[in-house]
Image (cartoon, rainbow, N blue to C red):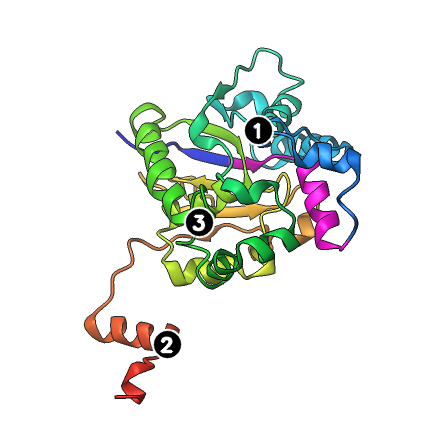
Amino acid sequence: MGMPRRIVFIRHGESEANVVQKWDKQGKDVMSAEILAIRKRTDYKHRLSKKGISQAIQAREWVNKNILEVGEFDTYFVSSFFRARETAAIISANVPEIKWEIDDRLAERNWGVHGTLTIAERKELYEVTDKLMNDDPFHAAFEGGESIWGVKNERIRNLMNTWAREQDGKNIIVVTHGDLIRAARVGFERVLPEEYESIKNNPAYKVKNCQCLEYARFNPFTGKDEGKIRWRRITNPTQPETSPDGGNWVELRGKPKMSSSEILEKIEKDAPNLIRKLE
């Protein structure tokens, strides 16, 4: 039993909700009847925008040229949400025999009641939660929603166990969502909470629409199978020049292990003790 040979996560293309969220951040009016209809739409039903369709086509061409021909993957997984399914359908449009396995574990992170609110409404109605999300984006969750910590522990870990049993040595492609991709990084790369904050706050690591997150258990430079996931690269098919780490392969560390002195040094660096100054 072992992990897949290659796992390619792809975020869906730009959706209706993404467009409205962008307008909201830009301070545009999002209260018109047409936009309210989109905001009130059940999250899983959001469709791709025109730009999202174009991004999915670009992602297909990128995968064909830089990873594998789309038809050469062994297994195809997709979130149950429509925007992800629509992206998947575009990616495999030229290979009609491909069948996608729809998996709810790949669904969008549940944002609870906050998913239908504007930025201003969130700050007004849930000021404390909004602050917690900024202070601790790893553990905090919106009312009725999920945290990244919860997604990683309950869904990503379950997926990893399933793939280890059923996808040993295979090449798999997965169309999902931005926060699922962040949670996948936490799981596969053994990211610590303070490291997640650094990733989340780094614009270079923003998960863009149709971004590809690729993991390999083979050495990409020698082709040698190393038996477990050891390598990662992130690419942006729609803007390759913005790909994190230059779009290059990065070797992953093993399980984080520290000596007593290293533990204390890191804690003091990330969270200097405050109470001792008052005692």
Q: Residue furthest top?
A: 97
x and y percentages locating residue 35 in the rendered image: 75, 37
x and y percentages locating residue 68 in the rendered image: 56, 30
From the viewer's side, name the closer residue of 274 and 216.
Answer: 274
**What residue is shown with label 2?**
269
**Element marked by disc 1:** helix
Q: Is residue 148 above or below residue 154?
A: below
Distance from disc 2 to disc 3, alpha carbons, whole Å, reads 26 Å
x and y percentages locating residue 85 in the rendered image: 59, 24
Distance from disc 3 to disc 1, alpha carbons, whole Å, reads 19 Å
Residue occupying the point 69% across, 30% down: 48
Single out the mark in the foreground, 2 or 3.
3
First-in-chain label (3 vs 1): 1
**What residue is shown with label 1?**
44
Residue occupying the point 67% across, 17% down: 94
Q: Residue furthest front?
A: 125
From the viewer's side, name the closer residue of 81 and 88.
Answer: 81
Q: Indicate the amino acid at tag 2.
A: Lys
Q: Magenta segment, which residues? A: 9-27
Residue 14 visible? The answer is: no
